Image (cartoon, rainbow, N blue to C red):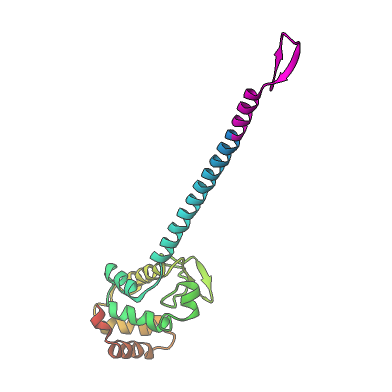
Amino acid sequence: MFYKFDKEQLVFTKDPKKLRRALSITIGLLIGTFIAGRYMQFKALDKYEKQLIVLNLEKEKNKFTEEKFIALIKELNMKFPHIVYAQARIESGNFKSAVFRQNNNLFGMREARVRVNTAKGTNLNHAYYDNWKESVYDYAFYQCRYMSNADTEAEYYQALDASYAEVGGTYSKALKQLIEKEQVKSKF
């Protein structure tokens, strides 16, 4: 291949043009393969990085803040939103309890067995959710199912004392104190 036949002398001699061409083609293929490989690697990394960015954006979007929580309560048009907010503060230990951090459970809710709910199961003897918003949606379902007849704050507190809290009577007192002290109504 890199030799040519000399008919006059009847011998094979090296052909430097063919050798250079073969080397050029081989080097070109190696460089092309390297570039194509790097391009594919960068393309794959780019796709992976985009997926990570989407996951991080989703995580950031679902990250809990009091402002987002208040906005969701308003968006869902919940009854007595200041009481709902106070409940979340008490039940979650000011958004620091293990049930809140591990279960995304703002309201200390148990997994509902009879009504519609958004819980994924039970952990730490409480319902757990994919994110804190699911906990708020679940409370909205609770409110629709069990608190729909409470037309006044007094009736709402009475219903909470009777069914929601473990210790009757003192729960609404704690809620009222927090609402007064923190001026919760002004947030709504």
Q: Residue at x 57, y 34 (%)?
A: 28
Q: Quadrant of residue 108?
A: bottom left
Left or right, 155 with reference to 62: left
Left or right, 57 with reference to 16: left
- As rendered, which of 137 and 37 lies closer to the eye? 37
Q: Which residues are magenta?
A: 2-27
Left or right, 20 with reference to 56: right
> Residue 138, percent across and down?
39, 69
Q: Quadrant of residue 74?
A: bottom left
Q: Residue at x 28, y 83 (%)?
A: 184
**Which image quarter holds the N terminus?**
top right
Regarding residue 84, the answer to whether it shows in the image is yes
- As rendered, which of 173 and 101 lies closer to the eye? 101
- As rendered, which of 4 and 37 lies closer to the eye? 4
> Residue 134, percent across and down?
41, 67
> Residue 151, percent across and down?
24, 77
Q: Quadrant of residue 76?
A: bottom left
